[in-house]
Image: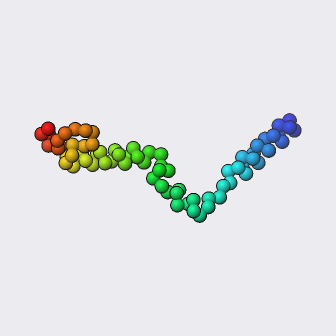
Amino acid sequence: MKNLLRAMAFLLLVACCSSCVSVKAYQKMYLNDSEMELAAKKLESFEINFEAYREGAAGANGGKVGGGCGCN
């Protein structure tokens, strides 16, 4: 029982100490990059495709030919 408490206390101490990381000033400019976002590219691509389809000027970006008027 005593060894179990020591092991748990040690693991708690290690977990608390390992999560403390200081970010240097020159690294802070990369924290807000669009590459850091998980789904930035998919969302941006969807918005561009939706806007082009809604405007009807290019027939979306799916490889279709013609405009949005239905005249292919």
Q: Quadrant of residue 67?
A: top left
Q: Position of residue 5 (x, y in %)?
A: 82, 40
Q: Is residue 35 left or right of residue 2?
A: left
Q: Quadrant of residue 6?
A: top right
Q: Quick one: 72 or 13, which is closer to the camera?
A: 72
Q: How many marks?
A: 0
**Residue at the location (50% across, 50% down)?**
36
Q: Quick one: 39 or 63, which is closer to the camera?
A: 63
The quarter of the picture where the N terminus appears is: top right
**Residue at the location (53% across, 56% down)?**
31
Q: Position of residue 4 (x, y in %)?
A: 82, 37
Q: State the residue lying farthest toward the top.
A: 1
**Residue at the location (87% across, 38% down)?**
2
The quarter of the picture where the C terminus appears is: top left
Q: Position of residue 23 (x, y in %)?
A: 62, 59
Q: Position of residue 63 (x, y in %)?
A: 25, 38
Q: Quick one: 64 or 11, which is closer to the camera?
A: 64
Q: Is residue 13 left or right of residue 71?
A: right
